[in-house]
Amino acid sequence: MDASALLNQSVLVLNRNWIAVHICDARRALVLLYQDLARAVTENYETLNFDSWRALSQAAADRAVIHTPRYPLMIPQVIKLVAYNRFPPLHVRFSRRNIYYRDRYQCQYCGAKPPHEEMTIDHIVPRSRGGKTCWENVVLACSACNARKGNRMLAECNMSLIRKPRKPHWLLGSRPDASPDTRPLWQKFIDEAYWNVALEE
Ligand SMILES: [Zn+2]
């Protein structure tokens, strides 16, 4: 991988309480590290400042490193902010694409996975009965289930949901290289629900 691709890699940002709050690119992560605003997090939960990280990078020539004029530098997978939170919390956008993604391209009534264009977005409490268009009230449905349900409430048509719909994790729909395969260390800091969705993609 060339240097610019490495510098564009995603790095998970933790706040000082070890909570994942953001994703930035490696370029910004290294700058924060250099400015002593963040520490690199290792697999053993050590937090290394720039000099320690640089020393570790020297001994890891086989790993993904970028070569600055004077020394090699590894790209950290995770950094931890030293002081206050410099990143505003992220929110996942309420969009058609993200509803598909959250519901794993699967009808939430019968579990079928028809072609994407045959899926519909169903209001659990129908709009005609005051149902809102929000994360908690919409699910993917195949056209058969959608037709069967019609304008009824769940109890009236004896149908049930595979999963209770909720607002997804903020990482959903974020940078495309943020997958468990490429970022094993991230899994220690992000709840399982997110990875389960990402893995089935
Ligand atoms: Zn269905």
Image (spheres, rainbow, N blue to C red):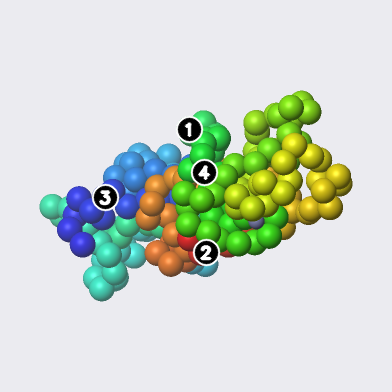
Is any atom of residue 114 visible in this view? Answer: yes
Q: Which mark is residue 86?
A: 1
Q: Nearer the viewer, residue 20 or 178?
A: 178
Please tell me which residue is depicted at 48% across the width and 60% down the height of the picture: 201
Ligand 1 closer than 8 Å to label 1 CB: no
- Residue 141 x %, y %: 62, 50
Disc 3 residue type (three-letter): Leu
- Identify the residue position indicated by label 4 in the image: 98
Q: Can you identify the residue that label 2 sits on? A: 200
Tell me the CA gap for discs 4 and 2: 14 Å
Query: What amino acid is at disc 2?
Result: Glu
Q: Nearer the viewer, residue 37 or 159?
A: 159
Type of residue at label 1?
A: Arg
Closer mark to the observer between disc 3 and disc 1: 3
Quarter-wise, where is residue 136 in the image? Answer: top right
Mark 3 and mark 1: Cα distance apart in space: 20 Å
* Mark found first going from the N terminus, 1 or 2: 1
Q: Is mark 2 within 8 Å of ligand 1?
A: no
